[in-house]
Amino acid sequence: MSQRGLEALLRPKSIAVIGASMKPQRAGYLMMRNLLAGGFNGPVMPVTPRLEGGSWGTGMAYHREPAVYPGSGGALY
């Protein structure tokens, strides 16, 4: 992996959490909670087809699929 690719993986500018959940026992919930509590500065996009249009409690809306922003340097988890 190139240094540029490694940099994008370790320091993404934005993150889409595939399978984000509002259920505390789910991995998607823990990932969202840790990203927000850890002070990630970029946009975080919760993605799950079942909760489209809902909110994660922070005003962030759920999305059915991750948006693609050319050159955003984002990561999908």
Image (tube, rainbow, N blue to C red):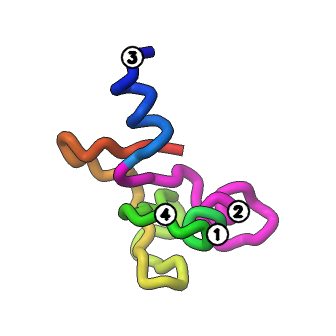
Rendered location of residue 40, percent (x, y): 49, 63
- Where on the picture, by quarter, is residue 32? bottom right
Relative side of 67 to 33, left or right: left
Q: Amino acid at mark 3?
A: Ser
User: Which of the two labelled residues, at mark 4 and mark 3, occupies the earlier sequence position?
Assistant: 3
Residue carrying label 4:
40
Q: CA distance from mark 4 to mark 1?
A: 11 Å
At mark 2, the secondary structure is: helix
For label 4, count other residues whose C-alpha is less than 10 Å away and answer few (under 14), some (14-19) or many (20+): some
Q: Amino acid at mark 1?
A: Arg
Residue carrying label 1:
33
- Whether residues under marks 4 and 1 lie with C-beta atoms below 8 angstroms apart, the answer is no
Q: Amino acid at mark 4?
A: Phe
Residue carrying label 2:
30
- Whether residues under marks 2 and 1 lie with C-beta atoms below 8 angstroms apart, the answer is yes
**Residue visible at 51% across and 58% down?**
48
- Whether residues under marks 3 and 1 lie with C-beta atoms below 8 angstroms apart, the answer is no
For label 2, count other residues whose C-alpha is less than 10 Å away and answer few (under 14), some (14-19) or many (20+): some
Q: Amino acid at mark 2?
A: Leu
Quadrant where the C terminus sits is: top right
Q: Which residues are magenta?
A: 13-32
